[in-house]
Structures are given as structure tokens and as C-alpha cells.
Amino acid sequence: MGQLNPLNIFLRQEIDRMQKVITIVRSTLRDLLLAIEGTIIMSEALGDALDMIYDAKVPSIWLRPSWIASTLGFWFTELIERDNQFRTWCFTGRPACFWMAGFFNPQGFLTAMKQEVARAHKGWALDNVKLFNEVTKLNREEILQGPVEGVYVYGLFLDGAGWDKKHSRLAESINKVLYTLVPVVHIYALYNVEIKTTTLYVCPVYKKARRTGLNYITILYLSTAKPPEHWCLRGVALLCDVQ
């Protein structure tokens, strides 16, 4: 696959972290079965894990190396989906479209993409490469192959606004709809270009609905017919996970 390719180096780092999560889940469940049978002593940590699993919460011993989730069901579903993405990428080949919410370090994913583009163009300095994006009109299922340059990303939700798919721009929220799924986004890199934001809303992207510095990933540019300040006052943001 090209072990020195930036995105493949990133994949290796993600798989290493995923292996740690899978290992700790497997060992905890194995020890719990043995403790319930009476083969080993039920320690305080195992007792806490058993109580939290009974209450459909994520055991704290699993949360430390992994990700935050409101219930054990959501956490385990994400574990399966993350594992599937890494497994497919590793054994089948680079995906045509990436689920950015399924990465431990999404910022590292975007940086690796910038490095890949910079290496493809002779004389491009990484410091002068800027991320830019375009929201397509396609859903994930319609993407059959990746872009010539950059990456396709899916699974982003708009909070505070709706999306006009026909004109590919921000629109007012639909009544009683909290989050709107955005079509596939093409993220790529530009060199030494000043981005004019008069018709673009500079939208922050967060991992979770809780908008803190720890959950902040990057900014994406969204087309708007209204002044960008209109959406800024409404606190419009993109979320990777709304559970």
C-alpha cells in the first residue's frame, strides 16, 4: 500500500489505538465470565464494569482509551463501525469515502491528506497549503471511487441550520428537525490561495454535540445566499456525532 504514504502512516496509528481498545474489551469480558463462574475473584474494577454494563453504560475502564458515548449500545455500534472502516481500508484498499467521525485523530487525517497533496506537487511547501472544500450533491452510496486529489468525507450533521441540496448552500432549519445530514464533502488542498469568505460561512466542525476545544476538529466553508453573520448569530456548526 506504500508504507511511507502519509495516509497509510495515519492508518497504522489508528489501528494501533483500535487494537488497544479491542484488547481491553476482550480481557474485561473474559475476566467477568470467569469471575461470575467463581474461577477468579471479582475485583472492584470488574464489579464496577459489571454494574455499568447492567445499567447500559460504558465501563470507565473502556472509556479511557476510546471515545465518549451516551449509552453502551451507541458505544458498541461505533466500535463495530470503526473496526469495519479500518479493516476494509487495510485489507481491501483505500475507501472511496471516509467516515471522519470514526477516527481517533481526525485532525491527523486532514494533515496527512495535506501532506499527500503537497508531495504530489513539486515545490509545494506544506506551510503554504490550505484546506478547502466543496459540498457535493451525492450521498455516500453514490460514491463509487475517490477523487483525483483530496478525500471524500461523509457523516457530517448541520446543527442550527438546514441544507438546500438543490443549490448546495445553507438554508433555514426545518421545523422539529434538530440535525440535518450534509451530503458527501470533498476536502482538498490549495496552494498560496487567499480564500474569500464574502459568500461563504466559515463553519466549525466538532466531534460531538458538546462544543469544546477538545472536540474541535477544523473549519469547513459552506455556501450561503445570506450574509455569513446570519449563520454566525445562529451558532451554526457541523457535528460528526449527534448521539
Image (cartoon, helix red, strand yellow):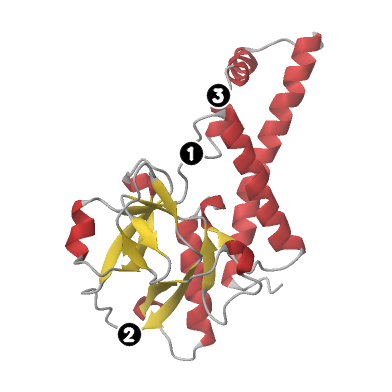
Q: Amino acid at mark 3?
A: Lys
Image coordinates of residue 122 in percent, x first then y, are 49, 91
Q: Which mark is residue 2?
A: none
Q: Which residue appears at 67% of the width and 55% of the height?
A: 86
Image coordinates of residue 175 in percent, x first then y, are 34, 45
Local packing at callout 1 (Cα closer than 10 Å; few below 14, some 14-19, many 20+) is few
Q: Is residue 137 visible?
A: yes
Q: Which residue appears at 54% of the width and 26% of the height?
A: 60
Q: Is residue 8 visible?
A: no
Taking depth in this image into account, of 26 and 137 the one nearest to the observer is 137
Q: Is residue 135 left or right of residue 73?
A: left
Reading the chain from its start, which is encountered first: label 3 or label 2?
A: 3
Image coordinates of residue 138 in percent, x first then y, are 54, 69
Reading the chain from its start, which is encountered first: label 2 or label 1?
A: 2
The answer to which quarter of the image holds residue 32 is top right
* Distance Cα–Cα, label 1 vs label 3: 14 Å
* Mark 2: secondary structure: loop
Mark toward the viewer: 1 or 3? 1
Q: Amino acid at mark 2?
A: Asn
Q: Which residue, given by chain and number where applicable, does mark 3 sit on?
A: 57
Q: Is residue 206 left or right of residue 142?
A: left
Q: Quadrant of the N terminus?
A: bottom right
Taking depth in this image into account, of 44 and 202 the one nearest to the observer is 202
Q: Which residue, given by chain and number where applicable, does mark 2 sit on?
A: 192
* Distance Cα–Cα, label 3 vs label 2: 48 Å
Q: Count the marks.
A: 3
Asked if the residue under mark 2 is in contact with the one under mark 3, i.e. CB atoms within 8 Å, the reply is: no
Q: Amino acid at mark 1?
A: Gln
Asked if the residue under mark 3 is in contact with the one under mark 1, i.e. CB atoms within 8 Å, the reply is: no
Q: Which residue, given by chain and number where applicable, does mark 1 sit on?
A: 243
Reading the chain from its start, which is encountered first: label 1 or label 3?
A: 3
